[in-house]
Image (tube, rainbow, N blue to C red):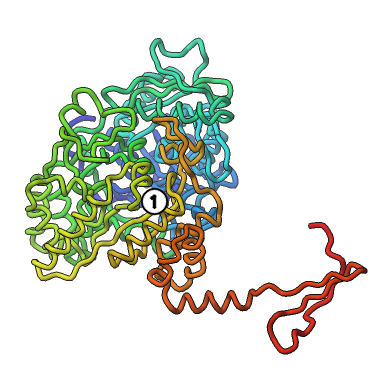
Amino acid sequence: MQENTSPIYTEFLPISRADMEARGWDQLDFVVVGGDAYVDHPSFGTAIISRLLEAEGYKVGVLAQPRYSDCEDFKRFGRPKYGFFIGGGNVDSMVSHYSVAKIPRAEDEYSPGGIGGARPDRSATVYTRLAKEAYPDLPVILGGLEASLRRFAHYDYWLDTVLPSIAEDSGADLISFGMGEHQTVEIARRLAAGEPVESITDVDGTCYLTDFDHLPEKYVECAGFRKVASDKVAYAKACRIQMDNQDVVSGQIIVQKQSEKYLVQNIPAKPLVRWELDKVYALPYTRRYHPIYESMGGVPAIREVQFSIIQNRGCFGGCNFCAIQLHQGRRVTSRSADSIVAEAERMTHEPDFKGYIHDIGGPTANFRFPSCREQMLRGMCNGGKHCLAPTTCSHMIVDHSDYLKILRRVRELPGVKKVFIRSGIRFDYLMADPDDTFFKELVEYHVSGQLKVAPEHCAPNTLAYMGKPPIQTFNKFKDKFYELSKKAGKKQYLVPYLMSSHPGSTLSDAVYLAEYLYKNHMRPEQVQDFYPTPGTVSTCMFYTGLDPYTLKPVFVEKTAEGKALQRALLQYYEPRNAEKVIKALKMTHREDLIPLLVPAEGRRAVQRSARRAEPAEVTIHNDGTYTVRSNKGRGGRNQSRGARPGPH
């Protein structure tokens, strides 16, 4: 990436042959394919990759949510000169399409009108195959979240089986994992210089398939696809090897045999340094969805991000259920204050800006720097060690002063009424700061009535498997938040994110959480079951029943009933959950909590239901017919008479 200033204009990139011709182009250099509607905003991967290629001087077209019944849409622009860059979308297509109960979703915020069905299941794979079908000899580089999480052999929750790498399944020439800017620029440059894609095997942040004779000289190997598909201990060990080699400083090349060929993962690409990050966010995005979607109701996903600013990337929090460490990585990089303030100032001139900046944040809003100096010299700690859990590491750099200066500058801009922080605040990092200036100003200026935080659970065992700090840390944060809010004369509330059925969470743990919520007067509206997305440590535990770092057994709730009971306990106060809550309390011998957790209305409903469901007397006659005599009503009338019960 060259350090220069990009031209500023507000023109969308071509989406059709007519758009190309209007620019006087006969042929594109690259087509960028995405699983989301075309939103030209830096919160969308397609926008970043396409604008980055444009800034490098290439002719680029955007193919958003192409039809997937055949490959004709991939020929829309004609044959691109150098190839395709493909991504599945901002959200994994399977998560986008299905709830954790595997029920199809009707809505998709990243599609026109918010209506689902505009992209296929496993969109990254489908699009890659279609591009190859359209132009078999053209290079296809597959990137984005969906590809990053599936780059190794992985457990697939929706099929309940282990699948090989997406590199094998899709037929892509290269997998670009992580955020992708460095890889994209280098791959594009080498393809444009005439280098065959088969020889581009040394780019950091990429994976490729090869045969045994062409493996690199030095690498670490994990068990192959067939082995991890049949041996859960091997799967867990492979997971640890993969996690321990995702650092740009300490990571090694990883090799894993797939069905026939070998997957080679090069070391991760270096994160963008500050001026590079500034340049990416200064590219000439229109910051809107394409006008073709206007008649369809627009693209709902723009609402949250149109007046939000991404100030950082990466997260050293290291939650085991989170995909960030496999995609953005654990090294935090951040934009300069001037870049952030300049973006905020541009927002104030937008015609529909109302004075409110919804967020200045990122994966974790209050991270601005790498976790420690040792991380920069030797890489992140391996073996499942976390920077913030179970306690804050003594090497941690804890500093909110830089972030605070940025917030102050932005809220002083003419036309800005309020600056909110809506992406996650890492409360344990905040509590580790001996200077409470940021906490005070957060409470006074940057909370929109509610502040989202993620304790996730309160049971010690469950939190340990999540990679989260003990609940005592959250308690201290909660108490101080309400104390500072009271001093500021504000009625503000915490909105806790909570998760049920995470590996390690027993029904007793869920009851413990419900009791905690009751005692702390918390009624969470946003709760979720653990969703086993590919690639994470928690998904490894879910599939194998093993902790990949110790190989010790982990309890995993997989039954539909058990999951339903745990989820109901998170919202114990809802009368509709009364029957499940009572059942869970009886199963764990905590009947003493029934009067506290179950509303009277719910208890009465359960009692009525129980009376209706009282067992009837069944008499089986000599001829095999039977009579059902109800215990209710006068005289116990015969209710039904049937034939001999047969086998089910």
Residue in the image at 37% along x and 45% along y: 461
Quadrant the C terminus occupies: bottom right
* Residue 292 can be seen, yes or no: no
Question: Quadrant of the rendered structure where residue 337 is?
Answer: top left
Secondary structure beneath label 1: loop
State the residue position of label 1.
38
Whole-percent x, y for residue 18 in the image: 43, 48
Depth order, front residue of 107/25: 107
Residue in the image at 44% along x and 21% along y: 264
Image side of residue 416 versus residue 359, left or right? left
Q: Is residue 168 above or below residue 368?
A: above
Depth order, front residue of 217/172: 217
Image side of residue 97 versus residue 476, left or right? right
Residue in the image at 36% along x and 62% along y: 515
* Residue 589 can be seen, yes or no: yes
Few, some or many C-alpha atoms within 10 Å of disc 1 (few <14, some 14-19, many ≥20)? many
Question: Quadrant of the rendered structure where residue 339 is?
Answer: top left
